[in-house]
Amino acid sequence: MRAVDIIQKKRNGGVLTKDELSFLIEGYSKGEIPDYQLSAWAMAVYFRGMNAEETAHLTMAMAGSGDQVDLSPIHGIKVDKHSTGGVGDKTSLIIGPLVASCGVPVAKMSGRGLGHTGGTIDKMEAMEGFRTELTRDEFIAQVNDIGLAIIGQSGNMTPADKKLYALRDVTATVESIPLIASSVMSKKIAAGADAIVLDVKTGSGAFMKTLEDSEKLAQAMVEIGTEVGRKTAALISDMDQPLGYAIGNALEVQEAIDTLHGRGPEDLTALCIALSSHMVVLGGEASSLEEAEALLRAKLESGAALAKFKAFVEAQGGNPAVADDPMLLPQAPFVLEVKSTQDGYVQAIQAEELGLAAMLLGAGRATKESVIDFAVGVTMKRKVGDKVNEGDTLALLHVREENAATSEVAERVRTAYTFSSEPVKPSPLLLSVVTENGVKRF
């Protein structure tokens, strides 16, 4: 078997076999197939695409290129959740305890943030003492004990995906739906879950900017999951404005805690309930989404989900008192107001701009080596549809010091808002659901 023949076959629109894809990925992982041949193959896939079976074979080849987690010692159906990334997305901190409180085990591996999207691991480390690294035995024992553990990804999971992604990044082949789908799903499958619920973001603050492209990506990922025997569902959610009001690690932890107390933002709560409902159904603890939603809301109202959060934080070395005293979280020394210079209704907010603003304050990473400041970030005070008068506060900047750089960030936040003289209706948060039965728009 030769790489050049596989490249030519895909270039001509052929369907690659499991053996051909395994040969390609294994050879590339070992350094036996050079970058220039994988680049040619990736470009052929970009133009010719892949069918569901091919994409599933590629996914499994990448999942098998490194460590795979065996979750079979954990009792029950293990359900994982993945978000394609957005601004203010702190859903894992809420969904994990919420779903676990319903009896569905959540054994989750999460990543760190890079650029304008925050990482769950960074947010959890904003809680002093919180351990994001556990041994395999500790991880499994904790899930069996309290139903929930969230840790950082293993260093040797899906090394082929890491290598291929770096290559795609410099060869203009990132925006290929089969390659994106296999990249995401290879990590989820290597992490060992029995079922997977996907939150696919769409809009200005998301990787996929249009609903149509987001649905295509969701369909590809659901098809992969189904093809390899994992129950999979996806929700398409709006990211034309940040989720909730808080952007920044400690600020987002506080908003997640508020939500578990039952006083969180309406959009954040609604999305967490929707995603959790699918997880509870796939986990076998409810027979319908309606039954699951009723169960989840009862867990929120009774305080069971909050109690699960406290047990989770304590089990991983953090102080559970943080759930009742937000001052235990890192606090920025200065809070600056960003005021509106005009009257009107908020028509749109460039979510990515607010994410970049928080990153520039120190809440995110410009490079993998950047050091995170857990305390800093942005708290929005106005969202799409809100009435604003000149002089009203649009957002608060939580900063380490007041200087020219923070003034530039303030201006960046201000210009991320656009206004209308007429009332504006916000876009729906939940746009469609994708299952093995197809796409259903709300």
Image (cartoon, grey):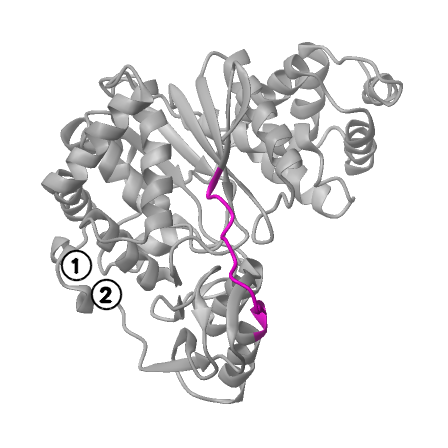
Q: Is residue 138 visible?
A: no
- Image position, residue 66 (x, y; %): 51, 28
Instruction: Answer above or below: position of 250 versus 36.
Output: below
Residue type at mark 2: give it.
Leu
- Asked if the residues shown at circle 2 and circle 1 are in contact, with their CB atoms under 8 angstroms apart, the answer is yes
Kindly identify the residue that appears in the image at 41 percent across and 77 percent down.
Answer: 393
Residue at 65% of width from left, 23% of height from top?
A: 26
* In this rendering, position of residue 45 left or right of residue 161: right
> Which element carries disc 2, helix, strand or loop?
loop
Q: Is residue 68 left or right of residue 349?
A: left
Amino acid, disc 1: Val
Report the span colored magenta. Answer: 415-430
Q: Earlier in the sequence, mark 2 or mark 1?
A: 1
Tell me where residue 68 sits by quadrant: top left
Badge 1 element: helix
Side of 175 where 284 appears, left or right:
left
Q: What number is the disc on residue 329?
A: 2
Q: List the residue tagged with mark 1.
A: 322
Which percent across, then down, holds residue 354? 52, 65
> How far apart are the two marked residues, 2 and 1, measured between alpha carbons?
7 Å
- Viewer-proximal residue among 330 and 37: 330
Q: Position of residue 328 (x, y in %)?
A: 18, 66
